[in-house]
Image (tube, helix red, strand yellow):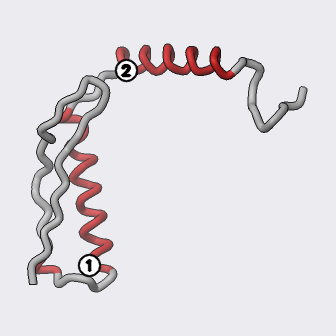
Amino acid sequence: MGTQSGQVGFLPPEVARELYTALLQKLIEAHPVTEDDLKPLNLERAEVIKEKLLAAGLVHPERVTVLDPSAADEKSEETASFKFTLDVRR
């Protein structure tokens, strides 16, 4: 069968949303993610930003330092946040 209006599947949008929300909650419960799990990802992200700045020739390599990520002040059960600071020195 084909789809109408670019929609995929056979569920009405409100039912699909409820199903998605329930499945997401089950996934979160089955595989919790901690701040310690996210630190390597944040460090990797910082390294990529550093490499992009250096590759573009925007800053001298001696002026770029990546520090360990730190948790943001705001805490949430639904998200994990880390501080991102970019200092530019002349």
Q: Which residue is mark 2?
A: 28
Residue 54 marker: 1
Q: Amino acid under label 1?
A: Leu
Is 7 on the left or on the right of 61, as rendered?
A: right
Residue farthest to the right, as pictured: 1
The Cα–Cα distance between marks 2 and 1, rounded to whole angstroms, is: 37 Å
Helix, strand, or loop for circle 1? helix
Q: Closer to the camera, 59 or 61?
A: 59
| Percent coordinates x, y for residue 47 in the rendering | 24, 62
Proximity of marks 2 and 1: CB atoms separated by less than 8 Å = no
| Percent coordinates x, y for residue 65 in the rendering | 11, 68
Looking at the rendering, which quadrant does residue 60 occupy?
A: bottom left
| Percent coordinates x, y for residue 2 in the rendering | 88, 31
Counting every numbered tag in the picture gives 2
Helix, strand, or loop for circle 2? helix
Q: Closer to the camera, 19 or 36?
A: 19
Circle 1 Cα neighbour tier, 10 Å, few/some/many (<14 / 14–19 / ≥20): some
Is 82 on the left or on the right of 49, as rendered?
A: left
Q: Closer to the camera, 48 or 20?
A: 20
Looking at the rendering, which quadrant does residue 62 occupy?
A: bottom left
Measured along the vertical axis of the image, is residue 81 above or below residue 86?
above
Seen at 50% across and 19% down, the residue is 21
Residue 30 marker: none
In the rendered image, the quadrant that contains the N terminus is top right
Is 78 on the left or on the right of 73, as rendered?
A: right
Q: Amino acid under label 2?
A: Ile
Q: Which of disc 1 and disc 2 is earlier in sequence?
A: 2
Seen at 23% across and 28% down, the residue is 76
Seen at 28% across and 65% down, the residue is 49
| Percent coordinates x, y for residue 44 in the rendering | 26, 55
Seen at 11% across and 45% down, the residue is 70
Measured along the vertical axis of the image, is residue 31 above or below residue 72?
above
